[in-house]
Amino acid sequence: MTGDEACAEGALAAGCKFFGGYPITPATEIAEHIAKRLPQVGGVFIQMEDEIAAMASVLGASWAGVKSMTATSGPGFSLMLENIGLGICTETPCVVVNVQRAGPSTGLPTLGAQSDMMQARWGSHGHYEIIALSPSSPQEIFYQTITAFNLSEMYRLPVLIMTDEIIGHMSERVVIPEASEIQLFNRIKPEEKSMPYWPYIPGADGVSPMAVAGEGYRFHITGLTHDEKGYPVMSAEAHVHMVERITEKIKRNISHIIDTEGYYLEDAEIVVVSYGVSSRTSLSAVYEARSMGIKAGLLRLKTVWPFPEAILRTLASRVKGFVTVEINLGQIHLEVQRCVGGNVPTFFVGHAGGTIIPPEHVLSVLKDAF
Amino acid sequence: MSIQSDQSDQQTHPLDDLLRKDRIPHIWCPGCGIGTAFSACLYAIKSSKLDLDHVSMVSGIGCSGRGAGYINLDSFHTTHGRAIPFATGLKLANPDLTVVVFSGDGDLFAIGGNHFIHAARRNMDLTVICVNNLNYGMTGGQVAATTPHLAKTTTTPAGNPETPFNLPLLAYASGATYVARWTILHTRDLTESIGEAIQKKGFSFIEVLAPCPVNYGRRNKLKPLDVLRIYQEKSIIKHFASPSELHLDLEKGITLGKFVDQDKPTWLDMYYKTTRKKS
Ligand code: SF4
């Protein structure tokens, strides 16, 4: 199964019932696969007129109470960011997959990159927190799509899966577990008959229970700055309060959200930081380095946003250096440098996109670092 | 005593249960036509006998786009131009909902024009009500896709060099199953028409001509009453007028009425039909 197909299967396993899409290489196969599968499970697939409409339809479907998603690549992701912002502001659970290809602009439609990582973090206007995952295999994208739905339902926001053309088009064995083995989380509903219901009164974990259309709550939501009733309030105080609330709900739960995987970190002197397809080539380089007696380790970011700052800072206090490996000219590398704070040297291996990073390039940096 | 009874008179209004009273006063200017169009819409919803818990309103951005904020139903104030695709997702994910889109001409036909024609082509089961005030009111009176040729706006100070869209004609050509045009002077026809449109299965579209005295009227020497007089004197009601007769023009007149009322399977009907076919 390809990564794209595994993503679609993961969505179905998570209970996704609506996909609003628009064709784009290299994400089209997700739409094609789920277009075939959704009617079999009572869901709806619609190909909209553009990615703006696709994203808007995904939000609408979520407010009708179903798990919804879309998938795209760079040019489409640029268009979706408008309504991803609405999803963040109105706290709408949904999943957006970006199968990254090399940009800017139309770039290399059929060749992979990891160069939309900062766009994923800051691409929609205004200040916000976002959750973005990065899978390194078809099996992992299957599981991460389920995780993405769970996180979106748990924290009420659009969750991004930042994969790439290489994982999307790669064919590998994917095991689909029994439904009973998959843990699903569904959004917290308001308590029965808790009228009047206001959509943004935070619960204990900072997340507000969510009613949906047709349940009789007669609520209002808006992309304008709003109060806890969901009503527009045009004041600096209301704005500060709202943005703090939607950022705090992520920040205070950061330890539950962030997922990383470490290799040889216990005694590593030099740590490779990587994610997605680049973490695979990085791992081969680390194995090779170890066989040569170099004390290398790998920190694989399964969650890229929020950035695992605390983990980086802890490592920075005891290792001698870091190497960031990614298919761009230094995006997550900036975050690594920020966390390391100049305490130890940071190296970078990457290029502008179109092909994977050969393990030898990583290895040569590991060899020459000290 | 009399003061008290005045107060209680003020405190009840036949649409009270459909209004978010805690959000009144609204933002609309004195003399604006949106309020009349909005209350026609509320009356139509109220007299529809629909279970109001299953009626949603979706708006985009602009003066008319504030509609969703004042209706006491599940209501969604979305991004500029995107009310229709948002409403599409809402409807497809729960077909039991009746979904009404209430927005303005700039929102639905300039930035959102592409979504409008495709939703009509698909025969998405939505009711779209467009308050057409011939300009962008909220941002201070800029030229719109509906501004008459040579009209003055802040971004066409020498007169609009462009030709406007004819909205019912566009809806008709795009495949809408119900198309009508009224003005805020024709409130009874308008209310009845909105009622029909809401009951109608498929993509229904109603254009409501309404004055924007503060921005459009002021620059084109049209007081609110002048506009109403034009609506009265220049309009001709012609149901099922042919597409070439849908004038909106001071010389040829303003054609009002119900122009299209046809039955066609909706997007969802066809989706079920095609996807549930035994292969
Ligand atoms: S600016 Fe024009 S359209 Fe907007 S509320 Fe005022 S009069 Fe109405």
Image (spheres, rainbow, N blue to C red):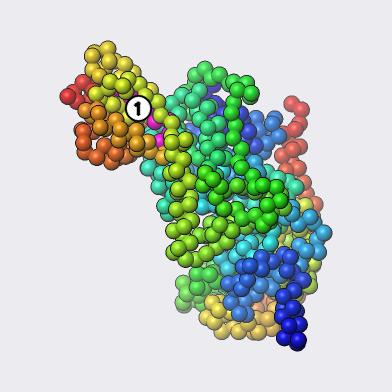
The quarter in which the C terminus of chain A is drawn is top left
Q: Position of residue A333 (x, y in %)?
A: 30, 36
User: Can residue B103 be seen in this snapshot?
Assistant: no
The residue pinned by badge 1 equals A299
Residue found at x 46% / y 72%: B155
Number of numbered discs visible in the structure rendering: 1
Q: Which stretch did the figure color magenta?
A: A296-304
* Residue B196 part of the magenta-drawn span: no
| Displayed-image quarter of ligand 1 | bottom right
**A110 relative to A126, above or below:** above
Q: Position of residue B251 (x, y in %)?
A: 66, 79
Judged by its main secondary structure, the magenta piece is strand
Q: Position of residue A53 (x, y in %)?
A: 57, 48
Taking B207 as reference, is A256 left or right? Answer: left
Q: Please state which of residues B182 and B137 is positioned toward the viewer in this rendering.
A: B137
Name the residue type under label 1.
Leu
Q: Please state which of residues B159 and B278 is positioned toward the viewer in this rendering.
A: B278
